[in-house]
Amino acid sequence: MLTYTAFDHASSAMTLSSRHGCDAMRTMVQCDFDGTITEGDASFFILDAYARGDWRQLLKEYRERKTSVLEFNTRAFAMVKEDKQTVLDILKDKVRVREGFCDMVDYCVRRGLRFAIVSNGLDFYIDSTLKELGLENVEVHAAQACFHPGGIKVQYIGPDGQQLADGFKEAYIRSFLESGYRVIYMGNGYSDIAPARQARHVFATGELLAYFRENNLEYRPMENFVDVVRELGVISQVQV
Ligand SMILES: [Mg+2]
């Protein structure tokens, strides 16, 4: 069990030397959840199990950029009428956390790196997964889900407290950068491309990795968090 307060950012103010000399910038990790921390997408497991309608068509429209992430999740999760515990139960055997995740969070705590999950996924299953791992204090920014008999309601609240329809991850990385952080980004999907392009270092898997490779952008491949911890050590030796 880790003992720390994730929101105590005063303790994350460790400064690291850059090869250009010492500076006062702080470093943090912005990490996606579905497909990055986990090996599958919890939202898709839920929708496959319980959505009463053609949610895959909505996903297709979202991936073709015809709808926003808010519209996709609002319409898709409105098709799920089950209660929270029933929905969480379906995930128990399906959501696998990549090897080394807890050690990576522990590494960030020990090195004074702020660690934040920023996800287009839904808060209740992220919180539940973290609780099972003993990591309930980790900073999370995700879609806020509200269970109703008529379906799950979803909303995205940006760093300024305003509702967002799209660009949730970009809004957060912008606010982290504006606060003076260097950002190390970890992600796997299309929605990670825009924020990852603004990060100092990128750990990528899946579609994000393919995009960075095809565009000759600098990235580090990640299969699990054992790799990530090793590479974080290398980064901090050279420049963060
Ligand atoms: Mg993802």
Image (tube, rainbow, N blue to C red):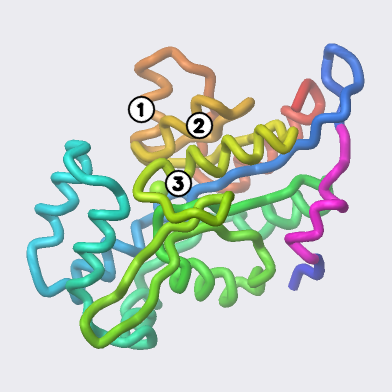
* Residue 15 image-quadrant placement: top right
Which callout, 1 or 3, points to the residue nearer the camera? Answer: 3
Residue at image coords 31%, 54% = 70
| Label 2: element kind | helix
Find the distance from the CA under tag 3 to the CA under tag 2. Answer: 13 Å
The stretch of residues the image draws in magenta is 5-15
- Find out if the beta carbon at label 2 lies less than 8 Å from the nearest ligand 1 atom: no
Q: Which mark is residue 5?
A: none
Q: Amino acid at mark 3?
A: Phe
Find the distance from the CA under tag 1 to the CA under tag 3. Answer: 22 Å
| Label 3: element kind | helix
Mark 3 and 2 residues: CB-CB less than 8 Å, in contact?
Answer: no
Nearest the viewer among 113 and 146 is 146
Depicted 45 relative to depicted 224: above or below: below
Residue at image coords 91%, 21% = 22
Crowd around label 3: few <14 · some 14–19 · many ≥20 (10 Å): many
Residue at image coords 78%, 65% = 5
**Residue 25, x across and y down, in percent:** 81, 30
| Label 1: element kind | helix
**Residue 137, x across and y down, in percent:** 69, 68
Nearest the viewer among 57 and 68 is 68
Which callout, 1 or 2, points to the residue nearer the camera? Answer: 2
Depicted 82 relative to depicted 12: above or below: below
Find the distance from the CA under tag 1 to the CA under tag 2. Answer: 13 Å
Q: Amino acid at mark 1?
A: Ala
The mark nearer the N terminus, 1 or 3, is: 3
Q: Circle 3 is placed at which residue position?
A: 168
